[in-house]
Amino acid sequence: MASEQQAQAIKNAKVLMVGAGGIGCELLKTLALSGFQDIHIIDMDTIEVSNLNRQFLFRQSHVGQSKAKVAREAVLGFRPHINIAASHANVKDPEFNVEFFKQFNVVLNGLDNLDARRYVNRLSLAAEVPLVESGTTGFLGQVTVHVKSKTECYECQTKPNPKTYPVCTITSTPSKFVHCIVWAKDLLFAKLFGDKNLENDLYVHSNDTSSSSENAEDVFERREGEDPEKYGRRIYDHVFGHNIEAALAMEETWKNRNRPKPIYSRDVLPDKLVQQNENLDKNFTVDNPLSVSAMTSLGLRNPQDVWSLVENTRILLESLKLFLRKREKEIGSLVFEKDDQLAVEFVTAAANIRAASFGISMHSLFEAKGISGNIVHAVATTNAIIAGLIVIEATKILQNDVKNCRVTYCLEHPSKKMLLMPVEPFEPNKSCFVCSEAPLSLEVNTYHTTLRNFVEKIVKAKLGMNLPLIMLGSSLLYEVGDGLEEDTVANYEANLEKVLAELPSPVVSGTKLTIEDFQQELSCDISIKHREEFDEEKEPDGMLLSGWTKSSTSVVSQSVPLEREDNEHVQWSNQ
């Protein structure tokens, strides 16, 4: 039973809840049943069939609808007199700015990706609103409390980078199924459907020997009026046939390796792909593009079946055709998402065909989705426990009882006879560039690295800035945002293709760059140090960012997950 002080703090609180998935459903239910009266939910996702086994506010009839809006309606069904606002939107949208965050007493996170977590952390800091962060993976979970100047922020401890593989292994000599998944997701899918300006290591030129290398056709470019099936077969034959034959010509590579087998579409399917589903009318439209499915079109139902080579070929060609016919407007801007059914089908099929070529065991869509999204399948009980712990910590914050807040880890096996391990929150890390504004340093070859590489691999990927502004002294080198003049945008675009040392204000060893993101109200300084060479395997970015170190107190968490990724693989500290 809550004390009168607790009850009043809860009743008067205005809560922002980000994420209405596995943790979010349990959290919204627990908030409502605990007496919270004013809640705003933000979630950009729609409900999938796979959510129904653990996200208990949703039913079969809700599939394809907004998670945030359905969760709201479900809870209002048993708590009709409370105020719940629901936004089917991305928390990184401009409307959810610092001023928006300032209206809340506490922010509660139930997110499933690092990028969004960083963003919410930074806006909570800027708005000076306490944040309760959370995550689960299988039987493991954690709840952490972040209060500006009193505890560490979410980014005080550096997050482990996703596992990377040498480019040559992915492009030429895969030996594991995960290598095939990375190739299908990060190279083939990105080449066909992603940003055409990004670098890609796929060999793209036609095997037409009559063409010079300079004028050789890029086979990934679809010819005007080209039939989707013919285009699909051309891509198939290039990546699984011609490219494999070209690789086989390098005899040295295969002296101590199994030789791959070229696969051509004509050898797997007859020249004319039999259309299984005549209902695929070109004028057919769908409300939710993410629900388009090659499996459905071809009558394949069980995601746990391992498809044959023929079935994988059919899925690959069918999914490519569906992207071209039903989602053409998205091509050029697509990024692989594990919740995009058609994208997962395409990547699974492509990875399996490549695996067959290299003598690697094929996997089911269910397994491939887990590998491509690093998914450890969720346990509903863990989500419920974590949701309860979030509410407990939020209640302490609302009573200004931060000294009694705890970081709590949910363990799979007892430690010191405990499955729930509470520890005191860590102090702010003085070397954190986010909450302590500590300077960073970057080792980079300033004569080889372009500004575009720096922006994509460091500013966006490592620092998590979405709308960066880059300055050298008083000189503005790059800026993104609305309201810029066309000539200014053109100048910045031109700068992106220049190496750092050849920019209008040269970036060389000893210079200091200032990077700002006004949307996040974040600024940091990076000192540049020129370095000639990098180890391709250990330093695949060709750059080394340092100065952002873990807090000395983080050794307390040696045996618990440091990465908070709801439904995603947790990486462990090996200090």
Image (cartoon, rainbow, N blue to C red):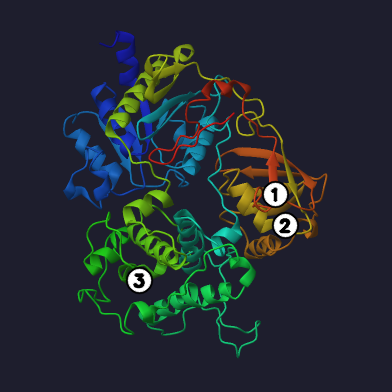
Which labelled disc corresponds to residue 313?
Answer: 3
Residue in the picture at 30% in, 68% down: 311
Q: State whether residue 406 appears in this view.
A: no
Q: Tell me whether the residue at label 3 lies in contact with that at label 1, contact meaning CB atoms closer than 8 angstroms.
A: no
Asked where in the image residue 103 lies, by quadrant, the reply is top left
Q: Tell me whether the residue at label 1 lies in contact with that at label 2, contact meaning CB atoms closer than 8 angstroms.
A: yes
Disc 3, SS: helix
Q: Tell me whether the residue at label 3 lies in contact with that at label 2, contact meaning CB atoms closer than 8 angstroms.
A: no
Residue type, numbered disc 3: Thr
User: x and y percent of residue 365 in the render?
Assistant: 33, 56
Residue in the picture at 16% in, 34% down: 77
Q: Nearer the viewer, residue 506 or 292?
A: 292
Residue picked out by circle 1: 543
| Residue 318 shown left or right of residue 546 in the figure | left
User: x and y percent of residue 137 in the render?
Assistant: 38, 35
Disc 1, SS: strand
Residue type, numbered disc 2: Thr
Q: Residues within 10 Å of mark 1 (few under 14, many from 20)?
A: many
Which labelled disc corresponds to residue 449?
Answer: 2
Reply above or below: 314 against 470.
below
User: x and y percent of residue 2 in the render?
Assistant: 28, 11
User: x and y percent of residue 67 in the render?
Assistant: 29, 44
Where's the C terminus, which quadrant? top right
